[in-house]
Image (cartoon, rainbow, N blue to C red):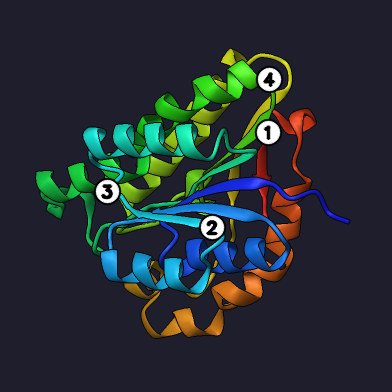
Amino acid sequence: MTHSRLILVTGATRGLGYAMTESFIAAGHRVIGCGRDSSAIQQLADKYPNSQFDTVDVASEQQVSEWAERILTALGTPDLLINNAATINANAPLWEISESEFASVTEININAVHRVLRHFCPAMIERGSGVIVNFSSGWGRSVAANVAPYCASKWAIEGLTKALAEDLPTGIAAVALNPGIIHTDMLNSCFGAQAASFDSPATWATTAVPYLLSLNETHNGQSLSAP
């Protein structure tokens, strides 16, 4: 029998986050999920009453702080923490990207990752075990035209995760994961009609979720790609 684990997923209401949430629960695990869409969060809570779903904007320090305190007090420390929530800029050359749009991408894709880690890492360190997965991208290891802010944010995640891995004590792992190219709303944004030719999040999750569950402290500091 598979040991049940407590798994935290940011951005759980759509795309890869939703697909992972369903797959983890189907495999017998308990999910702590968050998202900004309160209606979608309520639907998840109604569908999966044995897991925990909360409306949280990871761009808000106060909301993340209060959420972490509630979760750690009521449910305990996550065994697997997945920083999945992300956004992308509208296709455009870098010089045409407004300051506010650039800031929005880095706020969600970098600052919010740090925010979640800051509030959950201490509990994982105190317990002495756990795996942290920060979602990167193929564009965190290469680049493309018209998505410079997104590329910058995911390259940052690669460096942040490797540095975090150096800080962590034995027993805990932090990895950067390139999920691959999947048909999500973000892919629609940059690929247009071509996005539909790629696997759906649900199909992706059939192999990605077992892979995520297989990660352990020996993977600390690695840049990995989902199968």
Crowdedness of circle 1 by 10 Å Cα count: few (<14), some, many (20+)? some
- The residue tagged with tag 1: helix, strand or loop? loop
Q: Amino acid at mark 4?
A: Gly
Q: Pointer 2: what residue? A: 51
- The residue at the point 58 percent across, 38 percent down is 78
Horizontal arrangement in the rendering, residue 95 relative to residue 194 (left or right)? left
Q: Pointer 4: what residue? A: 128
For the residues bearing labels 2 and 4, Cβ distance under 8 angstroms:
no
Q: Pointer 1: what residue? A: 222
- The residue tagged with tag 4: helix, strand or loop? loop
Crowdedness of circle 4 by 10 Å Cα count: few (<14), some, many (20+)? few
Q: Amino acid at mark 3?
A: Asp
Q: Pointer 3: what residue? A: 57
Note whether residue 113 is visible.
no
* Cα–Cα gap, marks 2 and 4: 24 Å
Sequence-wise first label, 1 or 2: 2
* Cα–Cα gap, marks 3 and 1: 28 Å
Question: In the rendered image, which quarter contains the C terminus?
Answer: bottom right
Image position of 62 with respect to 108: above or below: above
Mark 1, mark 2: which one is toward the viewer?
Answer: 2
Horizontal arrangement in the rendering, residue 92 relative to residue 66 (left or right)? left
* Cα–Cα gap, marks 2 and 3: 19 Å
Image position of 144 with respect to 91: above or below: above
Sequence-wise first label, 2 or 3: 2
Mark 3, mark 1: which one is toward the viewer?
Answer: 3
Mark 2, mark 3: which one is toward the viewer?
Answer: 2
Q: Position of residue 121 (x, y in %)?
A: 51, 25
Residue reaching furthest to the right: 1
For the residues bearing labels 1 and 4, Cβ distance under 8 angstroms:
no
* Cα–Cα gap, marks 3 and 4: 28 Å
Q: Amino acid at mark 1?
A: Gln
